[in-house]
Image (tube, rainbow, N blue to C red):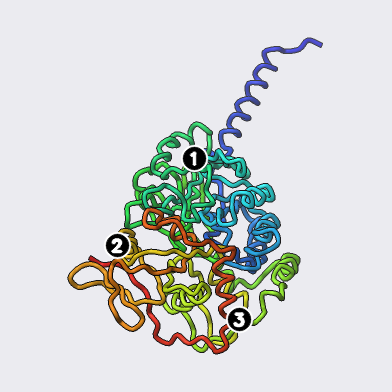
Amino acid sequence: MKVNIRFISIIVLFLSIITTSCNNKSGQDKETELSIFFISDSHSQIDNFSRIKSVIDRAGDETNIILVSSGDIFSGNPLVDFYSEKGYPVIDLMNRVGFDLATLGNHEFDYGQEVLQERMEQAEFEFICANMISSSPLLEQTPAHVVLNEGDLKLIFTGVIETKGKPGAVIPSTHPGKLDNLVFKDAADILGDYSGLKEESGSDLHILLSHLGHNDDRGASSDYSVAHDFPYFDAIIGGHSHSIQDTTINGVHIYQAGSYLDYLGKISLVIKDKKIMSEDFELIDLDAYPESDEELNAIIDLYNNNPAFSEVIGTNDIDLTRNRTAGCFYTDALMSYLGTDMAFQNPGGIRADLDTGDISLMEIYRIDPFGNGLCRYEMTVSEIKNFLKGTGAGFYYAGVKIENDPSGGIIIKGPEGNVYHDDRKLSIAINDYIPMVHEEYFPDPAEIYDITTAEAMIHYLREFDVPLSYDSCNRYFRYRD
């Protein structure tokens, strides 16, 4: 039988046109729905992962979904932070829930580089960070960005971390001693390199997974400034500032979902021709969510069942708040443990309140989860004044009275109110984080102790035979011109 070549050619051409037309509609010129779920600043909280899994499992029956974290998944829950393999429970649960991606947060470095590397290897999802360069033998270089394919959609995510950890340096807000052989750049110095990344990768959307914080009144890079200066991102999913964000700047929508796993953010998008046609933001209150995954609940219960942390080591007469009175207890404990003339503590190093009643080990580790070391310094009053003036930072203190002089300068008095002269030398109990961040104001330490500040507080409470009582204590000082 004679074959009609012309007829076959027409059929092949027709099929080719149909195939090309279908391919063009794949995530490009047809409307496609996408749901991006995300958490911000979960800080080692684990109880609500079972509810997140229930949300994700239900949503998976409806649309294309992606699940991401905008950083700071560690530091804040002693059951996780002091687990035999630090941070292991969080990554285990994130794997089981099905996370796709996370950007590095500043508190990811709190356990040290070696542990972070172990947790990254444990993760069944990728960690990204574009403004960190690692030459460390302990920590591998993370990708700057990754592509995720979901249904017909191709999505590229770029990650960034804040770099406001130390005056005069470009590092995240963690212990500087844990960042050896790591170089960080301000996000604004590198994001211009990615302006064409969406087109180059052929992606439908380019999303910034940010741990910069939504705003910064000191001029550092933030989600707001990035949206203003680099408006080529289709959206910014942020963290670090523990806020709820649902705002648009310069055409870029910025999202954030609070902290401590209280909420799960859900961004519902309709995408066509590589553009967002419509978007909706829902903040899911996880504590109120009625469903949870029973299998994951059982695993969470196992992680939570550590009776060692329930040991009672003291009592407390009045609630202590982290933004004032807890600082009095903290500095009294350090000063008493070392027998120094005074003590300092940075407010950011106190992470929880202390309720009235019995005080457990768990509560102390919640207050101080960072594992900072304890040091003693010998400094003159003049050196202490220079430190307080030069940093301009606020600190809790014990053992002395510190006042702003109405005529300018600082007055430091003894417990009885006598003014100390500038050449008087005082011994100081302090965590090792403060002198490393403000090293230009500190001499070499007189002694470094093989104990953490949390352990010093625990020892203090075990020896303290009456309840704590800090009714109106307000020992906080910040220099004012």
- Residue density around tag 2, few if under 14, some if 14–19, many if 20 or more, within 10 Å: some
Q: CA distance from mark 2 to mark 1?
A: 52 Å
In the rendered image, which quarter contains the N terminus?
top right
Q: Amino acid at mark 3?
A: Arg
Q: Residue at x 56, y 46 (%)?
A: 32
Q: Judge whether 95 appears above or below 354 on screen.
A: above
Mark 2–mark 3 Cα distance, whole angstroms, equals 36 Å
Q: Amino acid at mark 2?
A: Lys
Q: Position of residue 195 (x, y in %)?
A: 42, 36
Residue 154 visible within the image? no
Q: Secondary structure at mark 2?
A: helix
Closer to us: 376 or 177 = 376
Tag shown at residue 389: 2
Looking at the image, tell me whether mark 2 or mark 1 is earlier in sequence order. Answer: 1
Relative to 81, say whether 124 is above or below: above
Choose top left, top right, bottom left or bottom right for residue 360. Answer: bottom right
User: Mark 3 highlights which residue?
Assistant: 462
Residue 235 point in image, percent of width and height: 46, 49
- In this rendering, which labeled residue sits more in front, label 2 or label 1? 2
Q: Is residue 364 left or right of residue 225?
A: right
Q: In this orientation, does residue 391 appear?
A: yes
Which type of secondary structure does the marked residue at label 1 adopt? loop
Q: Which residue is mark 1?
A: 274
Q: Provide the secondary structure element on which disc 3 rests.
A: helix
The tag earlier along the polypeptide, 2 or 3, is 2
Mark found first going from the N terminus, 1 or 3: 1
